[in-house]
Amino acid sequence: MTLVYLQVYSVTPVFRRALKVLGACALTLNSLVSYAEWNTTLGNTMHYTDDVALFSVTRRLSLKDDPTQPIVDRPNQGGDFVYEPKAELAWDGENSFGAVNFELEAGGYVFLDQSKFSHGIYEAQISQAFATGTKVSLFYNFVPDLFLGQNIYIDVERNEQEEDESLSNHYWSVHIDQALSDSITVRLLGRYGLRVYNHPFEHRDTRFWTLGPHLEWEITPDVELLVGYHFEEGSVNQRQAFNFEDDVSYINQYASAELKVHLLQRLQLMLIFDYEKNDFNSPLLNDEHRGATEGVYQGELELQYALDHGMQLKLGWQHGERKLTTETQEIKNNNVWLGFEYAF
């Protein structure tokens, strides 16, 4: 385990800088309030994926994350082992309205052999609860230098060449939660985001917005259900896309169900099913994405076991299948993982 930490530490300087930011924010908040409760969570997970190009796309396909990752034109780029270090700092307090919470999280994926796919994931969240049972939460999520793999770049003179494709992903989100009873909470989610591509794929820069409802239901003290639906539209600058006949604008519909079952006092099971449909609405006659539709089905199973002293172990498997109507072959992806989290 020491070797794992040394490797992660040496490969992810951005992650180390993020930890320093977490500490600085903690000192600032502590100086502003007379009472604060702090919680810190550290974790590391070891994954194996059979497709490095789809790994981030499939792992972030979640109601609580970023289900509409950018299109991956070249899947099937081989398997690899992936480390996932994570650090989270949470602050809980009270004000005249009710409970207030602030969280910072820094993490990422570190690929053992195909290191180009390594990237960080950073998120900040602040939420305010009210006596009416309403809670408002604001999120900012940032993924810098997400490598998608090599892709064919076709210039304005129709010359083709191989280029590395990557982007930086930003989104801002608001959640409005309303408790209807002790066991049922409804949520309205809204998002706005940017995907900023590297040269020479700047014409793919995308703005997107998302709306959707969620429902959380505590069916029994041992069974909890989360269901949700998102509608999203992503659009590029059509004038720039026209020059390259490459318009990745889309309409996305996404639905998910997450079931949490407490099997034993310390053991719980997570079952998740996701469905996603992407309709690419390029108006360009020679664009390979014109009229294309992608369907994604994905299932996940995870066992979580709580040890003493805030330690939790987790073991999981995820299987996804996706099919683009312009392709003849269905793409399948499997991820398995073993990890831990320690809260103090």
Image: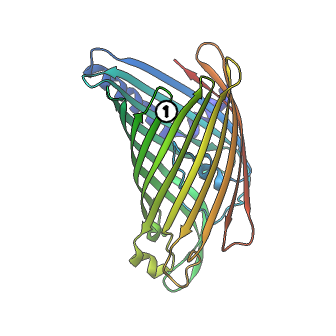
What crowding class fits label 1: few (fewer than 14 Cα within 10 Å), some (14-19), or many (20 or more)? some
Direction from residue 123 to residue 298 in the image, left or right:
right
Residue located 67% across and 50% down the image: 298
Residue 137 position within the rendered picture, expressed as x and y whole percent measured from the top left: 37, 37
* Residue 336 coordinates in the image, percent (x, y): 73, 41
User: As rendered, which of 75 and 113 lies closer to the eye?
Assistant: 75
Give the answer, above or below, for where 291 lies relative to 185: below
Q: Is residue 304 left or right of residue 251?
A: right
Q: For the point 55% across and 54% down, which residue is it?
A: 254
Residue 113: x %, y % from top left: 69, 48
Task: Name the image quarter holding residue 220.
Answer: top right
* Identity, as a three-letter code, of the amino acid under mark 1: Ile
Q: Which colour style is shown?
A: rainbow
In the rendered image, which quarter is residue 268 located in? top right
Observer-nearest of 169 and 276: 276
Q: Is residue 237 above or below residue 275?
A: below
Image point 54% across, 40% down: which residue?
12
| Residue 334 on image: x %, y % | 73, 49
Quarter of the N terminus within the rendering? top right
